[in-house]
Amino acid sequence: MQIYRLPVLADNYIFLLHSPPQQIAAVVDPAEAAPVINQLAKLGAELTAIFNTHHHSDHVGGNRQLLQQFPNAIVYGGAEDKGRIPGQQVFLKEGDRVSFGQQPAEIFFVPGHTRAHIAYYFSPHFPGEPGELFCGDTLFAGSCGRLFEGTPAQMVDSLGKLRNLPDNTRVWCAHEYTLKNLQFALTVDPRNAELQSRFTEVATARRHHQATIPSWLGIEKRTNPFLRWDEPILQAAVNSQDPIQTFARLRGMKDTF
Ligand code: ZN
Ligand code: FE
């Protein structure tokens, strides 16, 4: 499975999965159709699946037009998103499995950003290869999504599921927010040496207009404050000893950062 990253809108990424043997492709969160159609034409591949993580228009905006062009494509989304994702045919719950080409993906129910959000995890095809996590607006490189329809407790539970995955997992999140996220992270975790060097690398990449996605889950576990609600250093930064309160306070600070 090859993964292409298509930048769209102000700071969104669409991910296109391609399986060369069968010349089929799937797309994760098509904000727009045109860039996907162009990439499919370049590859000479047929679109067989649209994997949506949640109903926001910057994730599903291209669904209808893609279905016009590829009427046999199947639209997947969360069960709780029923009625909110254009063309949705498959309604996924925690622990369900989908497949693309020969590769199965596991579904995680990760409410918080929205009440219906799901993530798709492809475990490694061969030992030693990375897994691939498509997590929409739940986990970002250096941060997490805003809580529009969920509570801090729900988001901690959701992020906890993603945090349990192996370090050797590529994190394909849907927005290029990394630089600003790490600027915030440094305000609450200023002595974290790995975070400091990550910030320098990301700042350099962005100066050269390079993408910072995918990220690695291992790096997120060590430098993303929104995966570290149980670390004394972050609890001290927000004057709390409670994991969920720690997370909620961090999220509140980030909302106005
Ligand atoms: Zn969203
Ligand atoms: Fe989004």
Image: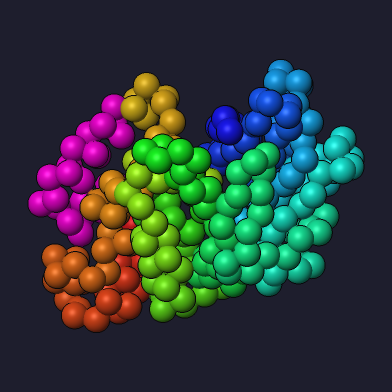
Find out whether residue 189 is within the magenta segment.
yes
**In this view of the protein, which residue sits in the foreground, 140 or 95?**
95
Q: Position of residue 58 (x, y in %)?
A: 64, 49
Count of picture labels: 0
Above or below for 200 versus 240: above
Query: Going by the image, does 227 lie left or right of 103?
Result: left
Q: Dominant secondary structure of the magenta stretch?
A: helix
Assign the N terminus to one quadrant of the image. top right
Residue 92 appearing in the image: yes
Query: Going by the image, does 216 lie left or right of 75?
Result: left
Residue 5: quarter of image:
top right
Instruction: State the residue lying farthest toward the top.
Output: 42
**In this view of the protein, which residue sits in the foreground, 212 or 164?**
164
Instruction: Tell me the residue at 20%/59% (across/down).
Output: 188
Instruction: Tell me the residue at 58%/60% (across/down).
Output: 107
Assign the C terminus to one quadrant of the image. bottom left
Instruction: Tell me the residue at 14%/50% (across/down).
Output: 192
Instruction: State the residue lying farthest toward the front.
Output: 127
Above or below for 149 versus 141: below
Residue range of the region highlighted in magenta in the rendering: 182-204
Q: Position of residue 230 (x, y in %)?
A: 23, 71
Above or below for 88 versus 131: below
Residue 98: quarter of image:
bottom right
